[in-house]
Image (cartoon, rainbow, N blue to C red):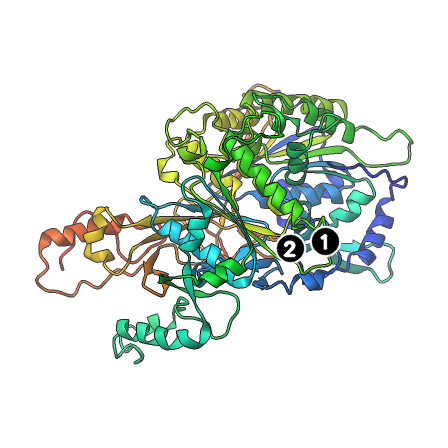
Amino acid sequence: MFPELNNLLNTTPDRAEQGKLTLLCDAKTDGSFLVHHFLSFYLKANCKVCFVALIQSFSHYNIVGQKLVNIVELRGAVPSTWVTQGVSLTAARECGQLVFLEGLKSSVDVFFRAQAAPHPLQFLREADAGNLQPLYEFVREALKPVGDGQAAWRCPVLLVDDLSVLLSLGLGAVAVLDFVHYCRVAVCWERKGNIVALVHDSGDAEDEENDILLNGLSHQSHLILRAEGLATGFCRDVHGQLRVLWRTPSQPAAQRDRSLTYQYKIQDKSVSFFAKGMSPAVL
Amino acid sequence: MAAVATCGTGAGSTGSIAAAASKNNVTSFQRKGPRASGTDSGCSRLVSIAGTRPSVRNGQLLVSTGLPALDQLLGGGLAVGTVLLIEEDKYNIYSSLVFKYFLAEGIINGHTLLVASAKEDPADILQELPAPLLDDNCKKDFDEDVCNDKTPDSNIKMKIAWRYQLLPKMESGPVSSSRFGHYYDASKRMPQELIEASKWHGFFFPEKLSSTLNIESCSLTHGYRKLLQFIQNVIYEEGFDGSSPQKKQKNILRIGIQSLGSPLWGDDICCTENCDNSHSLTKFLYVLRGLLRTSLSACIITMPTHLIQNKAVIARVTNLSDTVVGLESFIGSERETNPLYKDYHGLIHIRQIPRLNNLIYDVSDVKDLAFKLKRKLFTIERLHLPPDLSDTVSRSSKQDLAESSKLLGPGCGMMAGGKKHLDF
């Protein structure tokens, strides 16, 4: 996770909110750094995470997660020591904190071999537009509370990277919106957990299905993080602009939504955020 | 399929931090092999596959694309397990050449090839590969090639524009004795014995039309289903995914698919705007990428994107590929006779470079790149606008120059785009 982004969003892993749908959106740039942030954020916050990773492989997230530098105080050590550590996805997966669905690897299994049990990516084998019910069942199964009373994970979190690729795989926007709706009921409302999903904004590419999906999700989400490329083009020191929008979907629009804009630069191990025009390169 | 490992103890917060800190003293420097899933052991052996090298940034295993100039722009080479998508130029002249360079590089390095085409027989494609320039006799020829172009006083230090001397030069000559990227002579053919010594599999779609399938019908077109099945068979049988025992030396599979998406594959995505099975191509790319990520292979695909009428599909295809390079040749366009572009054959656009195992990626600062095909060299250079030196240039041609310069990419700050030529 990026400490500067935590400051901007005014959260820490200890005080993570519950029952929220966060929408990550990128337009003309790559917003995957936000996915890495939220993945390590919720793993640090001791939440049980179900990560539906449809775009990259497990080792990609693992290697980046280990690079993200977090300075934490090693409690219980005298004198108090500060260590830097990333988050290890392998360790999290082994101890049951992380349930990882690797889309690329499983798609090969689903596509070439007929599966006995319904597979979460069953829609890849179907000729006409399917639905995401097997995937929803998988998510619900993964995040259901462990009944033996020992596991003390804080709240379940569903992380999806990303939803736009589901449209490319033959599903309609309505099917994906249904899936998100079902997951919201199961995760956010029943179990007081969070959902974080990434959607690409196609901009002027006139992708109607994607626009329907994006608009539908924007109306349901509590927090929208939108990474955009700079309007002036490529810049080596400022990689893009992040717009943060806090929303309250259930209340009428009388209360004004709060919005902030920052610019960012992605570095090897973290991302630095600064106010518009205040890049360290120009100051 | 993600298996939920049931671990009984959910550790308390402080305990887990201490435990994690002691376990996680993994530094960010890792000598990493490719991301094939089953090959955890023998990591150091993987690095020594012929024709590959680890990336300097994150240890990712790279193969050469056959064009050292393009390798440099892509951050050292093409990562194993990824897809390189070439958006074809209008008459498919230079993109097929880039395709052939990729395959020729595979033959020189001893990689296994898989060539798929719906237009030409793969055996014919392999006959037309360019001949490699091997080190000993190539340097002599290359030097005289270069000397013909360079002006005699080019190695004198610049006196007026001395700041430009400090700009990094693009790689334009063969790196001495590097075994990673090779140069090819486009006018000669690859020697027959090299082709016969290499191992290759061909997929010629018209031949495979009648044979049966064992995948039940999904929304892929017939051609894509067969091709995926063929690729998966080759990967599985030859052990590129680590399934067969490791008694023989590991090798890379180079897959080349020509003109994917064209009507010859049975796909109507280039014909109409609202096609019936518009998800066929994107699904194919997704499953192909899944196959590549779990095996030691790299793939080049050329696609006639200038024929695809639905812009949304192009955006989706770009998102589903790892590296996307677009070629735009000047042949047949009005730029062919434009004095601005007289030194070059076309423009090359690096549309997307993947971020693999990393938050950042190697992006070159130069956004306006042009390529030039000489007999023995395919160079990619920063697009230079020639200086406007002549006094007798008429007003109308100056207008044309100003107009043409507006069409350059947004990263070019060299000439202000404007309609009127300001005459001081």
Count of numbered circles in the view: 2
Amino acid bearing label 2: Pro
Kindly indicate whether the residues beneath marks 1 and 2 are on one polypeptide chain: yes
Which quadrant would the N terminus of chain B be assigned to in this image? top right
Q: In this view, does B64 lie to the left or right of A133?
A: left
Q: How far apart are marks 1 and 2 (CA)?
A: 9 Å
Tag 1 and tag 2, C-beta contact below 8 Å: yes
Q: Tell me which numbered mark, 1 or 2, is placed earlier along the sequence.
A: 2
Q: Nearer the viewer, residue A142 or A108?
A: A108
In the rendered view, would you say B390 is above or below A256?
below
Q: In which quarter of the image is residue A269?
A: bottom right
Look at mark 1 in the image and give the residue it sits on. Answer: B39
Instruction: Please tell me in which quadrant of the rendered image residue B304 appears.
Output: top left
Please say whether residue B323 is visible from this viewpoint.
Answer: yes
Label 2 SS: loop
Say which chain tag 1 marks.
B
- Circle 2 sits on which residue? B34
